[in-house]
């Protein structure tokens, strides 16, 4: 069974702070994805990382795929209250899309 | 553009009752998935389908059955509901292909079993 472990599970920070969320596995993934979910809604894709060592930037969000393709990280610079939500990493071994347990982020003004 | 539509959005069941959740997508996606979401557990895969007429078990399949008779629809059934099945259920769909399997989600169904 391929598992995705996220840390931390909860994160409460002040506006303007930086943060990093981690997604780790003992298995190799051909790609990893990051989704964001707001209360009462389904998750929405933020990014897909495919190549080991790849770095992708989405405004203040930076995503990195580990060299060995077993882990990924999400870094948010100067967090804003609008970043509040549940962040989920996901992988699709053989098309079976599985998720980590999520990181619940709260950014206070 | 409807995307992924789940029916119903809310439901309360008594223990032992049965029900079917319907998921419909209009994007001609091959893959469809059913998840349950509980606090602190992320999304756990119940069953999934890689094409019309095919289904497969996910991480937590016990107590659920599914059918994919038409490409656009994926049904999740609870034959005898239990309080442990109280959860928020999400359906998703995606194009085939493991590397860039972006999934599109419905709005969720909040199910309470009393």
Image (tube, coloured by chain):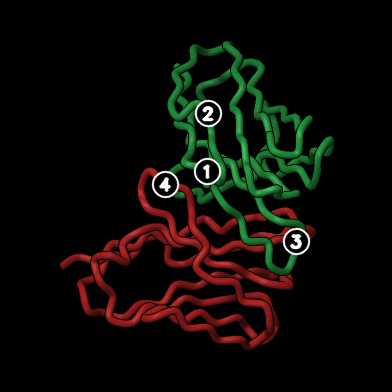
Chain colours: A red, B green
In the foreground, B101 or B111 = B101
In three-dimensional space, the C-alpha distance between marks 4 and 2, rounded to whole angstroms, equals 14 Å
The residue beneath circle 2 is: B7
Label 2 CA crowd tier, 10 Å (few <14, some 14–19, many 20+): some
x then y, percent, for residue B61 = 70, 35
Residue at the location (70% across, 50% down)? B29
Q: CA distance from mark 2 to mark 1?
A: 13 Å
Q: Which mark is residue A93?
A: 3
**Cβ–Cβ under 8 Å for marks 1 and 3:** no
Tally the marks: 4
Label 3, label 4: how far apart the Cα atoms are: 25 Å
The residue wearing badge 1 is B2
Local SS, label 3: helix
Which image quadrant is residue A72 in?
bottom right
Same subunit, labels 4 and 1: the answer reads no
The subunit carrying tag 2 is B
At 59% from the left and 67% from the top, the residue drawn is A33
- Can you tell which mark lies on residue A41? 4
**For residue A76, what is the image quadrant?**
bottom left
Q: Are marks 2 and 1 in contact (CB under 8 Å)?
A: no
In the rendered image, residue A41, in percent from the top left (x then y), is placed at 42, 46
């Amino acid at each position: 069974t391929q598992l995705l472990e996220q840390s931390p599970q909860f994160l409460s920070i002040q506006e303007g702070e930086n943060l990093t969320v981690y997604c780790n596995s003992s298995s190799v993934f051909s790609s990893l994805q990051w989704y964001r979910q707001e209360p009462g809604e389904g998750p929405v894709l933020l990014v897909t990382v495919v190549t080991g060592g790849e770095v992708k930037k989405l405004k203040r969000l930076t995503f990195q795929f580990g060299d060995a393709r077993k882990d990924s990280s999400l870094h948010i610079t100067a967090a804003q209250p609008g970043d509040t939500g549940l962040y989920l990493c996901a992988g699709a071994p053989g098309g079976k899309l599985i998720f980590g347990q999520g990181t619940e982020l709260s950014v206070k003004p | 553009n409807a995307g992924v539509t789940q029916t119903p959005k809310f439901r309360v069941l008594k223990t032992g009752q049965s029900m079917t959740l319907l998921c419909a997508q209009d994007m001609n996606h091959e893959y469809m998935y059913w998840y349950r979401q509980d606090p602190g557990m992320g999304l756990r895969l119940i069953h999934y389908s890689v094409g019309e007429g095919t289904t497969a078990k996910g991480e937590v399949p016990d107590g659920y059955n599914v059918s994919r008779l038409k490409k656009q629809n994926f049904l999740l059934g609870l034959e005898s509901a239990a309080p442990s099945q109280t959860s928020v259920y999400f359906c998703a769909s995606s194009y085939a292909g493991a590397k860039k399997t972006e999934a599109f989600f419905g709005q969720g169904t909040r199910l309470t079993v009393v």
